[in-house]
Image: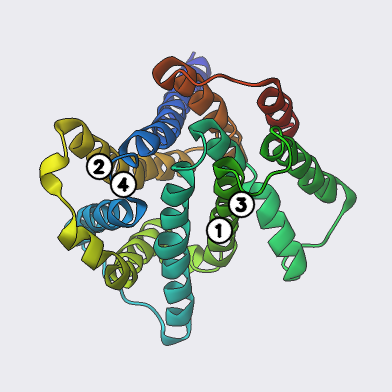
Amino acid sequence: MEESTLIEKFHYQKNIVYSVLFFQQLIAGGTHIVAKVVVKDINPVSLTMLRSVMAAAGLYLLVKLRGTKLNFRKEDFRSIIILSFLAIPVNQFLFLYAIKLTTPSNTALLYSTTPAIVLVISNLTGMEKAVFKKNLGIVIPFIGILIVIFERGIDFRSEYKIGHLILVFAVTAWAWYTVKGKSMIPKYGAFKTSAATMIFGTLMFIPVGVFDVVQFDYSALTIHHWGGLFYLAFGTSIFAYLLWYYAHSRIEATKVAIFANLQPVLTTILSVLLLGQIITSGFITGGIVTLI
């Protein structure tokens, strides 16, 4: 009786974690939708600056409440600076710039290739050995992405193509962040590493975004714009991350990673329902190949 009770309790807790992960992916999928809407009226530079400052302020408050000290070993400080640069000035800025030019579903799909790009970087840097199955796992998603990128033909002058090319750099930066962060997380923990890179990355972006933010006409913003900003700053950059961190502490990392495949699917569904996006046969074909 006791054994069956323990089993039931285990399954109950696991179901809670899966529910949390699904909700987390729904929030993450909504990020692409919200960013697409908000970036229409707030330029990418100002939006990156406002989002980063708000998120950094929220994370700094959490750091203080948790009693975490953002101190690092001298030999690791260079790595933290590089991670910070990849996180905000490169990844977040390029993401917001690219989504202005392309669709939320395409953006989410390209970000789903992050594990494949991580494998490429790991192979090139000698961190992982190249084996047939892994190489196949690299090639297949890139074929799917190429189908999506060139579904309208080869014309690099179009906004879609420019947006996709910018996304390639954004996703590559995020993959580099993932690879380089692997050595920092065991030493300092996921929360401390992420909080530091968000805060330091925001400080790096200030010289770029401060003039746009100061000159921006805030009177043109509605409650919907501010709601979108809060969603991007606190919902995505803080709350969704905390849910992800919670799941990682409860179940295996591989099971958590599987849920990341939900993001382009959920984003596509939300794009159709909320933005009236038309899903093409090229996107469906490329999406299926990529997710395989």
How far apart marks 1 and 4 lie (CA) works out to 17 Å
**Which disc, if any, is residue 164?**
none
**Res 192 → quadrant:** bottom left
Q: Amino acid at mark 1?
A: Thr
> Which of the marked residues, 3 or 2, is nearer the chain's N terminus?
3
Q: Is residue 53 visible?
A: yes
Residue at 75% of width from left, 44% of height from top? 142
> Which of the marked residues, 1 or 4, is nearer the chain's N terminus?
1
Front residue of 3/207: it is 207
Q: Position of residue 66 (x, y in %)?
A: 22, 57
Q: Secondary structure at mark 2?
A: helix
Q: Amino acid at mark 2?
A: Leu
**Which disc, if any, is residue 229?**
2
Q: Secondary structure at mark 4?
A: helix
Q: Are marks 4 and 3 in contact (CB under 8 Å)?
A: no
In the rendered view, does 213 fall on the left or right side of 38? left
Q: Which residue is mark 1?
A: 178
Work out which residue is located at the far right of the displayed protein and give it.
Answer: 132
Query: Crowdedness of circle 1 by 10 Å Cα count: few (<14), some, many (20+)?
Result: some
How far apart marks 3 and 2 lie (CA) works out to 25 Å
Front residue of 91/177: it is 91
Residue at 15% of width from left, 50% of height from top? 217
How far apart marks 2 and 1 lie (CA) works out to 25 Å
Q: Position of residue 291 (x, y in %)?
A: 69, 32
Q: Secondary structure at mark 1?
A: helix
Q: Amino acid at mark 4?
A: Ile
Query: Crowdedness of circle 2 by 10 Å Cα count: few (<14), some, many (20+)?
Result: many
Q: Which residue is mark 3?
A: 165
**Which is more foreground, mark 2 or mark 1?**
2
Front residue of 57/223: it is 223
**Which is more foreground, mark 2 or mark 4?**
2
